[in-house]
Image (cartoon, grey):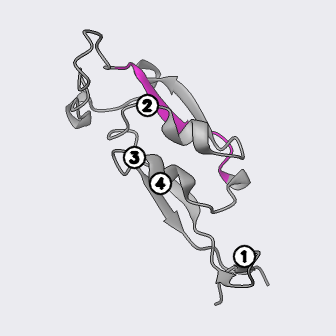
């Protein structure tokens, strides 16, 4: 089955890869994907409202910039409008923890 493709402004063929999953156990809630997404695909939610194993939470960013303020967050990203994803993959390019999975979508018959 063929994948959805498009053309760039220069005429080159491009295959979008759409968000399929977000690993909330790895997410540090930095909000970078939320800020860069042009389609409102993500939502920041309270980590305590989710059933996540805290052992999976990687606290590498506790105070990385040594500014005296803890960068630890009780927030985590979630997929809000998955079907609005346009496959640009900007979210993955800015994610410091590689939390997102993408796949091309098949052309509907």
Which x, y percent locates residue 35? 59, 36
Which x, y percent locates residue 73? 37, 20
Boundaries of the magenta span: 73-82
Mark sitting on residue 78? none
- Earlier in the chain: of badge 2 and badge 4, it is 2
From the image, tell me which residue sits under label 1: 8
Q: Nearer the viewer, mark 3 or mark 4?
A: 4
Residue 3 visible in the shown view: yes
Q: Secondary structure at mark 3?
A: loop
From the image, tell me which residue sits under label 4: 92
- Earlier in the chain: of badge 4 and badge 1, it is 1
Q: Kindly indicate whether the residue at mark 1 contacts the one at mark 4 (C-beta within 8 angstroms).
A: no
Mark sitting on residue 30? 2
- Earlier in the chain: of badge 3 and badge 4, it is 3
From the image, tell me which residue sits under label 3: 23
Q: Is residue 41 above or below residue 29?
A: below
């Amino acid at each position: 089955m063929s994948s959805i493709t498009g053309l760039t402004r220069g005429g080159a063929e491009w295959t979008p890869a759409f968000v399929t999953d977000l690993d909330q156990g790895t997410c540090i809630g930095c909000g970078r994907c939320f800020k860069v997404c042009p389609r409102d695909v993500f939502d920041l939610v309270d980590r305590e409202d989710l059933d996540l194993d805290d052992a999976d939470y990687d606290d590498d960013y506790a105070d990385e910039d040594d500014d005296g303020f803890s960068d630890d967050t009780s927030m985590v990203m979630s997929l809000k409008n998955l079907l609005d994803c346009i496959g640009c993959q900007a979210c993955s390019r800015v994610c410091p923890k590689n939390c997102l999975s993408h796949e091309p979508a098949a052309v509907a018959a």
